[in-house]
Amino acid sequence: FPEAIEAFDMYRPSCNAPELRVSHIGVAHHGTGRVLRSLEHSRKTSVANARLLHKAGRMSDARLKRKHKCTGVRAAATSVVQSTNTVYSSKGYRSKRGFLKSAVESVLSSGKNTGDEATIDRLQKTVVEPVNALEPSMEALSLDELRDKTAEFRERLNNGASLDSLLPEAFAVVRETSKRVLGLRHFDVQLLGGAVLHEGCIAEMYTGEGKTLVATLPSYLNALTGRGVLVGTVNDYLAKRDMEQMGQIHRALGLTVGIVLQSSAPEERKEAYAQDITYCTCQELGFDYLRDNNFVKESPDLVLRPDLHFIIVDEVDSILVDEGRNPLILSEVLLYDDAYQTKFPKAAEVAAQLEEGVHYKVKLRDHNAELLDAGMLRAEELIGVKDLWDLNDMWGDPLLNAIKAKSVFLRDVHYIVKDGKVILVDQNSGRAVPNRRYGEQMHEALEAKEGVELQNPTKNKAIITYSRFFKLFEKASGMTGTARTEAAELWTQYKLGVVTVPSNRPNIRKDYPLMLYMTEEAKFAAAFDEFWWAHKVFRPVLVGTTSVEGSERISGMLRENGIPHSLLNARPKYAAAEAQVIA
């Protein structure tokens, strides 16, 4: 049961009980009885040690209580594990291992807020209450006096004070400045979220809870060190919006603020990264890191700071989980001779004459295709060669790519054509990414398929994934509305714990279960029924699809039935009006 170990390890950070790391027991090599004894021994040892520390005056009453809460979850899990010897077969599980995995995950799921509640209780006393107590004194200060606090905090840091000791005052200063500059006062739950981010965890906050405002708290506090703070977003629009709005708070407090966009020149990037707080997209940040690593350390062309200090990632699950394994690739342009480039249009012409199932078969799951014997013979006949794989006149690779371009990579789904160029569509965000190209001659095959001018091919110069890149930061944190479901992966891959921050007001939204349909037609018909009823009661609806084609299909259904709507997808004519559509 490695999965059970992983589940326990996932829960451990929010319980603040490192001595209870179950993987230390070596579960995979022992039977259930041995595991139970080890678990119980660890639990009792943890409680006993806690009591000794409390007796010696080195542990507070509240912390001792939290320790009992955390170990109580383990005790409950232990009892569930013990029951597997007798009941797993009656539950329909094919093995004890399968039942154990489900049982442990069920226990941890039912008690998953225990660790969060302990963390929230601690932060309520150490952060929220002190900040609220400081509010009257902060209200008595002028804006200039609030700005002078920044110099005071930095001086105290230089004299040996820690960031944690400055946290209540710094948060109180930011809250008061926000009230003066933006007219927005941080709620108590936003103070909690800011403290969670400062501690290097992921704050799960519901949509509408003001995560953008939350980020101003830890970014200000950590920028006092002078080592720079990065706030990473998913696109240029959000980076610019956050910098223009939240940057007003930081500037009012005497900090410098910069922004890095896709269009930023190297000199502008270097200047932006040198500021106290820098807003950027995670993609641009990753590519700047790759470019910097191609220069010597003393090169004037370097744009990033020497060390990666602290980053706050907005929509962290999208960046670290959805795109975590997608590589960022820095390429250099290669030059092919004219004779070789003429093969791509010819291969596209031949591929158009081959039939799927007769000459080749497609593997959509792997985004791949395979030539059959009949296809090889037919292709050799059409091209006029004896061997597609002749090393002196290679046609096999261009032809296979042409077949994939025809049957696997679809226009308006995987890419669009704009201004005579093939532009890829990011499958996670649905946005066109002009500077990204497929490798291994796949992009040239798409260009030949669409009949546009072939661009020079590229060669990978440097590569890194988000999962590797973000581990380079001394401290990283993030915020999102949907992190709990990805908590296991975020802890396993990044050692980032997830803390669910309560909402400012009770949530009255109803979350309905997932609806599954046998066919795509049935799914779209059911979706249209929802749109129709919402329109009748004047309820605005946001519809997300996984492709350009899907969005236009729904748009057509709405148009045919006279339902007014706006369409936004990666097609140039719609993408250009994005801001207007959103407004």
Image: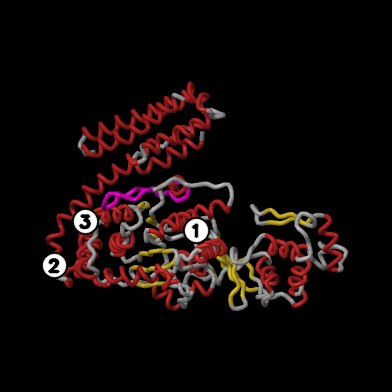
**In-image side of 230 versus 5 (left or right):** left
Percent x, y of residue 522: 55, 51
Q: Which of 406 and 532 lies nearest the eye of the viewer?
A: 532
- Magenta residues, start to end: 491-510
Image disc number at residue 70: none
Percent x, y of residue 385: 86, 67
Q: Quadrant of residue 420?
A: bottom right
Q: Which residue is mark 3?
A: 168
Q: Are marks 1 and 3 in contact (CB under 8 Å)?
A: no
The residue type indicated by label 2 comes to Leu
Residue 265 drawn in magenta: no
Q: Are marks 2 and 1 in contact (CB under 8 Å)?
A: no
- Neighbor class of circle 1 (other Cα within 10 Å; few <14, some 14-19, many 20+) is some
- Neighbor class of circle 2 (other Cα within 10 Å; few <14, some 14-19, many 20+) is few
Q: Quadrant of residue 183?
A: bottom left
**In-image side of 438 versus 355 (left or right):** left
Under circle 2, the secondary element is: loop
Q: Which residue is mark 2?
A: 141
Under circle 3, the secondary element is: helix
Residue 500 drawn in magenta: yes
Q: Which of 201 and 518 lies nearest the eye of the viewer?
A: 518
